[in-house]
């Protein structure tokens, strides 16, 4: 039998990869899949960003760069955060990584270790828990609840603190719920982090995709209250429709950045030089493409929310950020047919050719995640087919239907 390292007992592949693989298998058989499963923009990368990448190749900007990213790109990250959030960081406090994912795993490996407890949340993006486990620390998962709009309040986080707590890892806007942490909530957590010397790692990969006028400025809260303890992780992936380019970053105290740099220097080294030039154009060029995409997501969010919750057995809060609806389908499950949301998602894909992500992937059974980074027509079709499936699997149930909220 293959003997793997002990850590593999704690770490598994990302459960969000399963649905895209199954959908791809169907596509290869010639089936047209309505894809509401993937967590990525359906827009093309903006033209000026692509042009910068072409120019980088033509100028032979194709060698290794500084491991933490070219100086001008790190300066552009600082300038973007200054303009958008009013916070001051220097290039020595920035590292550019292969997506927000690498920025986050670097931080977990640099800050957490055996015997440490790290408080994070569910429903949540599965990699955050797995990265803590990869660092051989213990994830302590606090729960947000559907009937509170999945609000991420400070009490649950602070109530989970023990003498072994080493830090917090918080994602806002949250994948999969779309919930956004208010500034006041983060301020309370940041004060405790500063007071007790705990790390505060924020996954802000969707922070340019918030739909309310008074969106919270979480980087400023961290910079003002826990600058020495805060790690801000961001990404070009969702903001600029650049998922495949692999570019993210962390802003943190220089000593933390140096530690992340050491880890990255022994794994992937610098992000592709061509991607770096593209990201430089994205961050320092015109930002109207970001606003235009956000407005389109907002339109789709409103339409998708109305479409999916039109069925009395489907409920959802309207998400304040990111591009997912997190549907409560517990009223659509039936013990004698489709018992779990994972089974419902499988049936929806296998029989109705609609890909959505089961809540189980986010530690939230009873839910389905629907991406509205998809054309309106696909959302309309997806809602109709989900409703038809629900009517077919639980037509006579006397379960009391609860109105959408
Ligand atoms: N954080 C969250 C919550 C995500 O959903 C994702 C991607 O889906 C990431 C971070 C990482 O994205 P990337 O590595 O493409 O920047």
Image: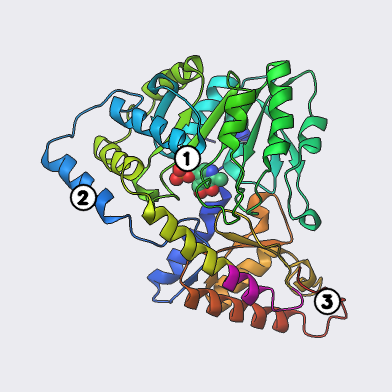
Q: Give the quadrant of residue 97.
A: top left
Name the front one of labels 1 and 3: 1
Q: Name the quadrant of the N terminus.
A: top right
**Residue drawn at (33%, 23%) of the image:** 67
Residue 192 horizontal/vertical position (percent): 74, 23
Upstream in the sequence, badge 3 or badge 2?
2
Report which residue position mark 1 lands on: 84
Q: Is residue 216 left or right of residue 57?
A: right
Q: Which of the 4 image quadrants contains residue 231?
A: top right
* Label 3 within 8 A of ligand 1 by Cβ: no
Marked residue nearer the N-terminal end (1 or 3): 1
Query: Viewer-nearest of labels 3 and 2?
Result: 2
**Mark 2 Cα-neighbour bin, 10 Å: few <14, some 14–19, many ≥20:** few
Residue 219 to residue 396: above or below: above
Is any part of residue 5 visible from this angle? no
Which residue carries the number 3 mark?
Answer: 401
Instruction: Residue 128 in the image: state x and y as whole percent.
Output: 60, 38
Please tell me whether mark 1 sits on a helix, a strand or a loop.
helix
Q: CA distance from mark 1 to mark 3?
A: 44 Å
User: At x 23% / y 27%, what residue is drawn?
Assistant: 64
Side (left or right) of 281 relative to 369: left
Residue nearest the viewer, comparing 403 with 352: 403
What residue would you read off at disc 2? 51
Tell me which segment is drawn in magenta: 302-313
Q: Secondary structure at mark 2?
A: helix
């Amino acid at each position: 039998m293959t003997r793997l390292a002990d850590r593999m007992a704690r770490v598994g592949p990302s459960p969000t990869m399963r649905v895209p693989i199954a959908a791809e298998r169907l596509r290869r058989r010639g089936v047209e899949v309505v894809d509401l499963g993937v967590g990525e923009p359906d827009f093309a990368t903006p033209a000026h960003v692509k042009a910068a990448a072409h120019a980088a190749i033509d100028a032979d900007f194709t060698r290794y760069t500084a491991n933490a990213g070219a100086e001008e790109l790190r300066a552009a990250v600082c300038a973007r955060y200054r303009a958008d959030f009013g916070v001051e960081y220097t290039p020595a406090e920035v590292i550019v990584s292969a997506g927000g994912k690498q920025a986050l795993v670097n931080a977990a490996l640099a800050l957490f270790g055996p015997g440490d407890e790290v408080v994070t949340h569910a429903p949540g993006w599965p990699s955050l828990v797995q990265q803590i486990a990869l660092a051989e620390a213990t994830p302590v998962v606090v729960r947000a609840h559907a009937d509170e709009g999945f609000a991420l309040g400070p009490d649950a986080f602070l109530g989970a603190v023990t003498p072994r707590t080493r830090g917090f890892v918080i994602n806002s806007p949250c994948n999969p719920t779309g919930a956004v942490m208010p500034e006041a909530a983060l301020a309370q957590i940041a004060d405790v982090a500063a007071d007790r010397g705990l790390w505060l790692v924020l996954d802000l990969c969707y922070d340019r995709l918030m739909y309310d006028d008074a969106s919270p400025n979480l980087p400023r809260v961290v910079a003002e209250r826990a600058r020495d303890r805060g790690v801000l992780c961001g990404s070009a992936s969702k903001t600029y429709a650049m998922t495949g380019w692999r570019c993210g970053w962390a802003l943190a105290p220089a000593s933390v950045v140096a530690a992340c740099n050491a880890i990255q220097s022994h794994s992937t080294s610098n992000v592709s030089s061509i991607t770096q030039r593209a990201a430089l154009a994205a961050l320092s060029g015109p930002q109207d493409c970001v606003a235009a995409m956000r407005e389109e997501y907002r339109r789709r969010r409103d339409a998708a929310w109305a479409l999916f919750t039109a069925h009395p057995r489907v409920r959802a809060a309207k998400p304040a950020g990111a591009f997912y609806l997190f549907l409560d389908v517990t009223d659509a499950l039936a013990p004698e047919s489709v018992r779990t949301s994972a089974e419902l998602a499988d049936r929806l894909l296998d029989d109705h050719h609609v890909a959505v992500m089961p809540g189980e992937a986010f530690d939230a059974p009873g839910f389905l995640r629907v991406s509205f980074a998809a054309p309106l027509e696909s959302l309309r079709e997806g809602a109709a087919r989900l409703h038809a499936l629900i009517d077919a699997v639980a037509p006579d149930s006397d379960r009391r239907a609860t109105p959408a909220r």
